[in-house]
Structures are given as structure tokens and as C-alpha cells.
Amino acid sequence: PHSVSLIRVRLHAYHHGSSSLETHQKNQMKTISYFSVALFSVSVEVKGAFVQHFSSRRCRVNGSWVDVKNGSHRYVHAAGKNAVINSTEAIGMPDVIGSAAGSRPINPSSQWGKPIPEGLQNFNKASIGFVKNALFDTIFKNESDDRQRDYARFYALETIARVPYFSYMSVLHLFETLGWWRRAKYLKIHFAESWNELHHLLIMEELGGDKLFFDRMIAQHVAVFYYFFVCMAYATNPTFAYNINQAVEEHAFETYDKFIQEYGEELAQIPAPKVAQDYYRDGDLYMFDEMHTSNSCEPSRRRPTCDTLLDVFRNIRDDEAEHVVTMQHLQKAEIDISSVNSVDDETCVAFE
């Protein structure tokens, strides 16, 4: 009898525990369901706000202005053809690149960015200048005739210069995944810009700029911090993020230009590294062309010489100038940039 009673007690405890466990699991499932519904509702509301606020646009196809509003279609005669402007492609639909179909004056700054005042622009430029002069020019100061410290400084700068384009692509991928906004060509252009900065970095590595552990540590740690900073800035206001990068690229242009003026004769005696010749002259130049943006129906393609190290640094300097122009255009809500690979003379699109 004692054993039977003990078994009954244990069975009762097991049954009571199972019931409590089932109740707890049901409560958890209810909580998860409520949270999922709330998250979905917020996502729908935010997406709806994007659609409502950014669905009205006006663009010009070969000289004729058309209105694009609320996902409607407008047809306009362009170069003997009917060009279709479809605003719904800006959100949740595939992008059409390099033709009048699907083109519209929408870039990240016009989608969720805000214009920044001139005072903030000046502050951004001054801040970048201070960091460059106080940190990098001091740490990588060259006190001898050896160019290695210059190459190490350029290695650090190029390691960091790639970061904004990674940040832009990360945010654009996130927004596309959430169904908030999609423009494939901006991912493509920013990737081409990162590809350009990668080859600047490869050139500096081939010149020995990454030999010292300390130089690599400084560059890589700053790059990681800068990545997350630009991600947050771009997600909240891409105009601000583009303006910061414009200041970075302007300082990069000035740095390389000064280096060329000081050591041009010496650089002219040194052959160009093979990685530079492959990127600028001998290899597939599609990605090189892709980082060149144009708002004109008559784009020109750079075909630089690349025989000496002087040619290489001139090309890098000119690349930085191209990045500056792209960043300037991307801060203007009315401009929809395209690479020179995407422009078709018969169906070119220009935006006011």
C-alpha cells in the first residue's frame, strides 16, 4: 500500500507538472504570435509611409517632362519610341537599368534623406581634415627620403576609404530585404566604387604599405568603427552620409595631388605595378567604367595610361575626383545618376 501511494503521488506530480508546462508553452506561443503581428503591422505602416511619401515624381525623357504619381504609367514619345515611366518599380519591383523604361528621379537622398545645412557641411569637412592631420599624418609621418611611410599612410587611407561603400550596400540590402526600397543600380554603382578602392588598396599592398603590424592594426580598427558609424548615418540620412564621404574623397584627392607634385620625378622612374596595369589598362575595364557616373546623354570613358608609378598615382587621384562628383550628385534629391555603362543614346534619360 505504501508503494502504491507513492506511485500515485508521483503520477499526480507528473500530471500536474505536465499541465503547468503545457500552459507555459501556450502562453509563450501567444506572446510570440502577438509580437509577430505587431512587428508585421509596424513594417506595413513604415512601408506604406515610404510609398505614400515618395510615389510622386517628375522626370524628363529626351526633353519631354512627364508626371509619375501613385504607381501610374505615363507614355511619352522619345526618339521615335514609346518610353514607359513606371514609379512602382521604385518599391518592391525589379529595377530597369540603362533604358527609359523604369527610370525616374529617385535616389536614396530623395527617398529617406534630408538636406543638410551649409554649416554642417563645413563641420564635416573640418572634422575629416582634423582627423586626417592629427591622426594619420602624425602616425604615418615620413621623416626620411624613404617612400615606405607614404605607402603605409596610403594603405591606411585606402583601407578606410572602402568602408562607406560597404555601409551603403549593407543598408540598401537591408531595406530591400524588408521590402522598403529597391534600386538595383545603386548597389551596382557602390560596389564598383568599392571595387575601385580595393584596387587602390591592392596597389599600396604591392608597394609594401601593409608590412608593419601596427599600421594594419590602426587602419583595420578605425575601419570597423567607421563601418558601423556610416551604416547608422546612411540608414537615418543618406544625404549626411554622402556629404561625409565627399569630404573624405576631397581630402584624398588633395593628398595624392600633393604627393604627385612633390615626388613626381621620382615616381616617373618606377614601373607601374602589375595590379595597376590590369585594372587601368590591360584587364576587363567594365568595373572601372561602372564607377564613373553621368547625368548626360554623351558620356565619355576614361582610358588612362599606366606605364609608370607616376601614372598610377595620377589615376588614383583622378579616381578620387570622380568619387567626389558622384557624392555631390547623390546629395541632390532631383538627380538619378547612372554609370557610363548604363547610358543609351536612343533612350537616355536626363533629370532636372
Image (cartoon, helix red, strand yellow):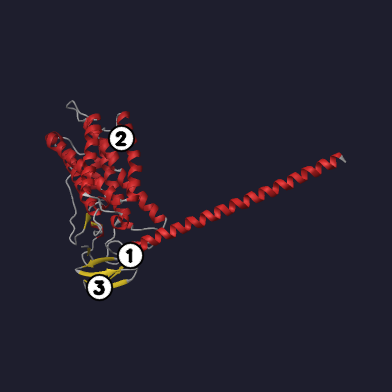
Give the number of the mark in front: 1 or 2. Answer: 1
Q: Find residue 128 and report its horizontal and vertical position in percent.
A: 24, 40
Q: Image point 30% across, 45% down: which residue?
A: 164
- Structural distance between the alpha carbons of marks 1 and 3: 19 Å
Q: SS of the residue at dot 1?
A: loop
Is 345 in front, or is 206? 345
Q: Residue at x 27, y 49 (%)?
A: 242
At 36% from the left edge and 50% from the top edge, which residue is drawn?
171
Residue 76: assigned label: 3
Q: For the residues marked 1 and 2, what is the alpha-carbon distance in whole angstroms?
A: 42 Å
Q: Earlier in the sequence, mark 2 or mark 3?
A: 3
Tell me which amino acid carries mark 2.
Ala
Instruction: Tell me: 264 left or right of 56.
Output: left
Q: CA distance from mark 2 to mark 3?
A: 51 Å
As drawn, is 64 to the left or to the right of 162?
Answer: left
The answer to whether marks 1 and 2 mark residues whose Cβ atoms lie closer than 8 Å is no
Kind of residue at badge 3: Val
Q: Closer to the N terminus: mark 1 or mark 3?
A: 1
> Where is mark 1, residue-wise?
55
For discs 1 and 3, the disc positioned in front in the rendered view: 1
Marks 1 and 3 close (CB-CB < 8 Å): no
- Label 2 sits on residue: 219
Query: Which quadrant would residue 67 be assigned to in this image?
Result: bottom left
Secondary element at image label 3: strand
Judged from the image, the secondary structure of the residue bearing numbered disc 2 is: helix
Question: The N terminus appears in which quarter of the rendering?
Answer: top right
